[in-house]
Amino acid sequence: MAYDQDLAFVYFGPTKIVFGAGAARDVEMEMAGLGCSRALVVTDPGVMKAGLVEGVLKALGDRCVGVWSEVPQDTGVGIVNRAAAFAREKGADCVVSVGGGSVIDTGKGICILLTEGGGLENFEGIQLLTRPQTPHIVIPTTAGTGSEVTSMAVILDERKKQKILIVEYFNTPRIAILDPKMTEKLPPLLTVSTGMDAMTHAVEALQSTQREPIADGLAMQAIRLLHRYLPVCAKNGADLTARGQVQLAATMAGWAFGNAMVGLVHAMAHSLGAIARVPHGIANGILLPHVMAFNLDDAAEGYAMVAESLGVREKGMDEAGAAGSAVTEMGAFLRRIGHPLRLSETGATEEDLVKAAALSLSDGAIVNNPRMVMDEEEILAVYRAAF
Amino acid sequence: MAKFNAMTQEWLDAWKEKIATSAEYKEIAKNWEGSVSIIVNPDPEKGIPEPIYVFTDYWHGDVRDFLICDKAKAESANFVMSGDFARWKQVAKKEVDSTKALMQGKLKLKGDLTYVVRNIKTVNKVIDLLCEIETIWPDEV
């Protein structure tokens, strides 16, 4: 691998990681360590129903001043504003998010409003805040988004009918508690699709125009762990060793893409999610090998590193050969873990693909793709190859 | 070629002229509408004793106001970008990519990033044209 002599980058990853089966019980201790005493717990109805919040509430005891459990699959500005008002009314001095990406992003929004006041619609933008925000502890119940360690939140502005992006170093979660037991009951499809979300984060970080050595290292280890342990989780969700390694991989991939950014796979998956409601992880997984094939000539070095991590770079293989074998193995991996292989399986229509191709051009992720994309026809061709 | 002092009205006029006479810009920017302000944080050691507020306005391939302005005018723009003088100088000299600078916290943006990305060719062209101006930077005087 080669980095330019003028390599210059910022790596940011301040989140403390607490890992281990049963680690969620430590939430009260971790919270006290932050100097906090009044937690708002944020979660969603599915996580509540699965019984994953009970242990956290028991551990928090009277340090929990309220539970906000009305987070939908795609959170919105109105929801965050109402949740923040509730948190303020309860006198919360920290937020504990128990859930997946939507819950965590809701928690991030609440943290801003508890510190800054006002409505979240006023905080659309990048690096606008000038002081640390309300402490945020995250206990993920999926292993994929990496949101527990990133500075980003994507939240639907219901009035504008579009998602807004908030990127704030000052609002990065302080602590992520990775407890494999919290993901133990994830059904196989959700396990593999969230796992492929993490895989996509890692691969796209390695191919990004903003890639750098620290993110590269994290991404490579994330790919190794996912390649080894995601198939185990798909077969036996109760294997806590495998669950834990996949959680760690998702977090490492989160650090990697949080610094190096993502690319065309995400631009296309975001758009397909908006147009046809295709779940993010599934869209990422299906599209990943196809976008890798599309980018191949412009990302051979990064994909050769993917091949090394996947264990398919044979001795004497040149960079281009290794990159090609990474693409082939990624497709084979999807089949091994039982992940959907075609977009046609997701309910998306050919008409949706046309709309999504146009929308993809305006997605922020596309800026960091190694192959410059300026024409929606190119994107449509990739969608069609995956259909 | 004439040289202009950075962040002055003459410099802005020269930049505006460059953009207004670029056929390539006109074509690329046909979808862009809206104003962009640039706020340069004070840095007395580099010759910037007070904040500098710049307001630029673009409309479907045309350019409108390019002004040194006050804080209120700057904050009224559709997109408000702010940062230290050294960062702006790096962007203006194309030593740092503007998107990268935003994501890494070197510059701040208030506004819709997706709109900026959708029109990234326009943004890059505006910066390219700025680079064509012979600029005298206050810390190099």
Image: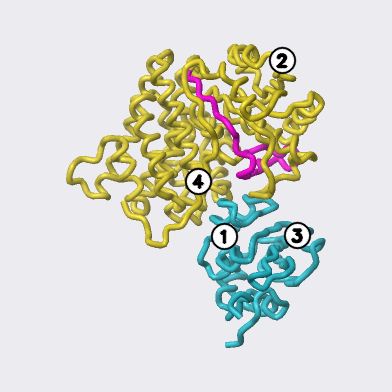
Q: Which residue is mark 4?
A: A259
Q: Amino acid at mark 3?
A: Ala
Chain under numbered label 4: A
Q: For the residue labelled by badge 4, is the local secondary structure a helix, a strand or a loop?
A: helix
Left or right: residue A169 compared with residue A189:
right
Disc 1 element: helix
Q: Which residue is mark 1?
A: B98
Separation of marks 2 and 4 at Cα, in angstroms: 37 Å
Magenta stretch bounds: A153-180
Same chain for mark 4 and mark 1? The answer is: no
Of circles 2 and 4, which is in front?
2
Above or below A6: residue A281: above
Q: Quadrant of the C terminus of chain A?
A: top left
How busy is the neighbourhood of tag 4: few (under 14 within 10 Å), some, or many (20 plus)?
many
Q: Chain A in the picture: what colour?
A: yellow
Residue at 51 percent of width and 50 percent of height: A366
Circles 4 and 3: CB atoms closer than 8 Å: no
Q: Position of residue B118 (x, y in %)?
A: 59, 54
